[in-house]
Image (cartoon, rainbow, N blue to C red):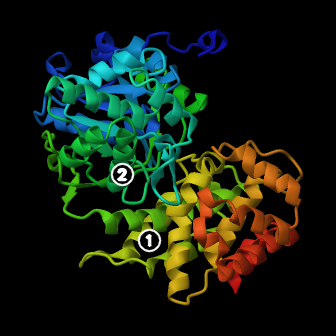
Amino acid sequence: MSSSRQSKGETSMRLGRANLDRLPAGIRRPAYDRSRITPGIVHLGLGAFHRAHQAVVIDDCLAAGSSSWGIIGASLRSPDTRDALAPQDHLYTVAVRAAEGTEHRIIGALLDSVVAREKPAALVERMADPAIRIVSLTVTEKGYCHTPQTGDLDERHPDVVHDLNNVDAPRSAPGFIVAALARRRALGIPPFTVLCCDNLAANGHTVQRIVTQFAALRSRDLGKWIADTVAFPCTMVDRIVPETTNADRDAVAAALGMRDAWPVMTEPFTQWVVEDRFCAGRPDLAAAGVELVTDVKPFELMKLRLLNASHSALAYLGYLAGYETIADTMQDPHFARLAARVMEDAAVTLTMPSGTDLAAYRASLLERFANPALHHRTWQIAMDGSQKLPQRLLGAMQDRLARNLPIATHALAVAGWMRYVSAIDEQGRAIDVRDPLAAELASLAREAGPVAERLAPALLGVARVFGPLGAEPRLREAVTAALGRLYKEGARRAVETLVSA
């Protein structure tokens, strides 16, 4: 925080263990003695989502007596989170924002953090500690070094190539997991459970495939041992977590009477569905509200195809229409109807357990998207679309085509992505596209020009995104037509035309 802001009367006191008793009475704080907590989890990907979701659940578990399940967080690349949290004893605030007000809670489940790039061998050593029984992950779709369309390891990925040549100093999440499991195997230590909390199709099975494929490139026996002994439960996670702004930091400081360098903002809703399959024990997740099930897939597809797909549609088309946040976008009744249409079209592709109320779930999503207190930027959600499209939009499109159902709504969302990754908005301004394939996609867009009949086929030919589906004539026709409308009418008018038909 700048000195100029502090000169206006802001407190210089920093959140930390020594200051917990100086918090206002209405601030919830850890309901346990942190000095008695020991680590049982290493989490890869110490971002805002983990700190607003899984870490909150573990905080509840610690309060209920599961004292050996504290978290060691690992940032794979950037030191920013560690540098923000270490001076405040890894305590931080979760600010839960609703239209009627904000609740603040201090989370103590994070005991320590490391930056993998600084000392990769030290992270491998911590993961190999027998006390660690779960390694969880929120590294985003791109962090698995895989091909989203197939779910297989991308053996040509630069981090995979590096890790195979530097087995004790990895860079990637699969590289760290395999290095730690190999160390445990060599020392006779039982393996840990690998708990993926990212939006991947069949995420546990996908990560198992990626990790065992990586391990087999090191040693066929190691790959077989991992396949035979390591548990990879599937999960579904759901909570909206916008990026934290300086204004958010100021608001939290005012509520706490002290500074928190990196609080996280979120919504009241939270859900975590987990396949109950762990090879080295687990905390009492059910007591903290986690749904433990035998088959996560229906819930995972429900979230990917209803929440995430409509979120992406709102992000790309809303950004192009000039809306900064999802809540802003939802104020436009045509875009609110677009989100509902994406969900309606995807719902027919789902087979849910008896008693699941999809209509109520869809209604709750629309309410959550419209939450005016949650400033979730369309630009943030638009990141890494090449990794997200297969799970969020393309699967439902493929299933609808198999049923001979129209795909116009999803086609417009995909066309919005195409228009977005061309890196030029409707006013001719540059778009800051954040995507692993950004350079390749922008190059294809420059070569094709702003002509739907050239750009749509060029991008549909990117096999790492669309695979064989990109050659499907009905999909090509629908997406090309939708992209043509975006260029001709603009995003606002194209959405209005679609939902009014």
Quarter of the image where one finds residue 88: top left
Residue 101 visible (yes or no): yes
State the quadrant of the C terminus: bottom right
Could you say which is closer to the camera, residue 100 or residue 397? 397
| Number of marks in picture | 2
Instruction: Report the residue at 38% width, 30% height from top.
Output: 176
Left/right placement of residue 358 relative to residue 407 reads left
**235 to 496, vertically: above or below:** above
**Taking 155 as reference, is 196 left or right?**
left
Q: Amino acid at mark 2?
A: Arg
Q: Secondary structure at mark 2?
A: helix
- Could you tell whether 87 is left or right of 189 in the image? right
Q: Is residue 331 above or below residue 479?
A: above
Camera-nearest residue between 382 and 265 = 382
- Residue 135: x %, y % from top left: 29, 35
Report crowding for label 2: few under 14, some 14 to 19, many 20 or more residues within 10 A (C-alpha).
some
- At x 41%, y 19%, the residue is 120
Q: Amino acid at mark 1?
A: Arg
Side of 316 where 423 appears, left or right: right
Give the quarter of the figure containing the N terminus: top right
Task: Quickly name the residue at label 2.
Answer: 209
Percent x, y for residue 151?
Answer: 45, 56
In the displayed structure, would residue 18 be above or below residue 494? above
Disc number lying in front (2 or 1): 2
Residue at x 56%, y 40% (from the top left corner):
157
| Residues packed near mark 1 inside 10 Å, few (<14), some (14 to 19) or many (20 plus) | many
| x then y, percent, for residue 449 | 89, 59
Residue bearing mark 1:
362
Query: Farthest front residue?
Result: 220
